[in-house]
Amino acid sequence: MVRLLFIAIFSWLFLPVSAQRITLSPEQIETMFLRQNLELIAGQMNVSIADAAIAEAKVWDNPELSVGDINFWKRRSTDENGGAIGYPKQFSVELSQIVSLSARRVKLANVEKVGKEITVKQFEELLRSMKMELRSSIAETAYLQNVLIVIENQKRVLEEVVAGYQTQYNTGNVTKNELLRLQTALFAINGDINNIRAELNTMQKTLKNLLALESSTMVIIAEEKDNFPSPLSLNSNTLIEIALTSRPDLEAIILQSEYHRKDIAYQKSLRIPDVSLGVKYDRYGGVWDNFFGIGVGVQIPIFNRNKGAIKTAQIKLRQNEILVSQGRNNVQNEIVECFENYKATYFFLDKEIADSTQNELDNMLDVYAKNLLLKNISIVEYMDFMDSYRSVKEMLLQSHKALKLQFEQLQFSIGQDIK
């Protein structure tokens, strides 16, 4: 079987000498994915952006410095003795600062803090979705590799049969039609191999994109025995309870309600006007030659009390509460569906593996070929066996892939791995 694995893999593609083939287990692939995936690296930066928004929300408004009343002309006057003097130019300087009476910066910072929590959950959701895509790609690639082994095994045996029939045809022991029937079957197998290779090329592209690998790299999935938990050890109600507290997409929706509550408090704080405090120095601009004064300014909230923004935030909160209820309902229904699918496939595959005759089928492949060459069976019987052999092998591989994907879908619906 190991020899057939290498034959199938190395006949997969005609690669240039510079191509790098790496054999990785699913666990190794996932570790590489977490370390190298460019989309995840970019997604992590959103958390830093949220931190910057929190810091910015806490900062005071900048003070304002203004210089005015500048007179470029000197005025002439007389001193106490009647002498003419020239005074320096006239100007004024004012420094003002906006002061919030409603703690709006604190409330805005609270809004941004919840926004950061939402960003973290959105990143976790991105990670959850991409891990599902990665694991599905691994399962599909492993399935195609194993299908290729089955077909390559058939091809090997059928090539021996065709070579034997060619020899017998040359000696006149078989007819041209019999030889042509076998050659046609071999041609069809070669066509199937080409189709599988094309599908493997597509999966290679997906894996290399997810792992940020160079185009010259070929990833080979190492064979591992999967240990799937029995559905009897799982309880759908327990899985639902776990999902309701661990699904990042649902947590993000719940946090969105908290975000709107904080935003309502912030919008209400904007009803209270800010106060402007200022200090002014005026040189030769009035009665006194050097004047120092202070000032206070405040908007009078008569026409605009921010009612529209407050109402909008309140409506968004009520709207999001509806989405939270819908999200919880979706999660529960999704888990029940995934659990039932997993349970059905698990017991089907478990029974088939226990009752199947896979090893006998592999042994019979060579036995049937030998019997055909010895004319103990007809070509029709031989081709029927070849069709049955491939159908059974592909059905088992397909069922195993389906079980793997449904288990991953169940974990995806819960929001965490099942230990």
Image (cartoon, rainbow, N blue to C red):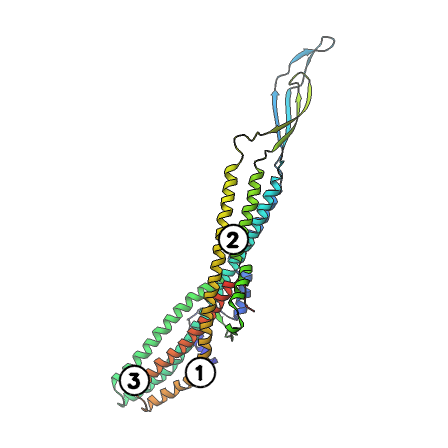
Q: Residue at x 56, y 36 (%)?
A: 271
Dot 2 lies on which element?
A: helix
Q: Residue at x 25, y 86 (%)?
A: 175
Amino acid type, residue under disc 1 in the picture = Asp
Label 1 vs label 3, nearer the camera: 1
| Rendered location of residue 385, percent (x, y) | 35, 83
- Is 338 drawn above or below residue 389 in the view shown? above
Task: Kindly identify which residue carries mark 2.
Answer: 253
Task: Kindly identify which residue carries mark 3.
Answer: 380
**Quadrant of the drawing holding the C terminus:** bottom right
**Badge 1 local density, few (<14 within 10 Å), some, or many (20+)?**
few
Q: Nearer the viewer, residue 394 or 254?
A: 254
Q: Is residue 91 left or right of residue 416?
A: right
Amino acid type, residue under disc 2 in the picture = Ile
Mark 1 to mark 3 CA distance (whole Å): 27 Å
Q: Earlier in the sequence, mark 2 or mark 1?
A: 2
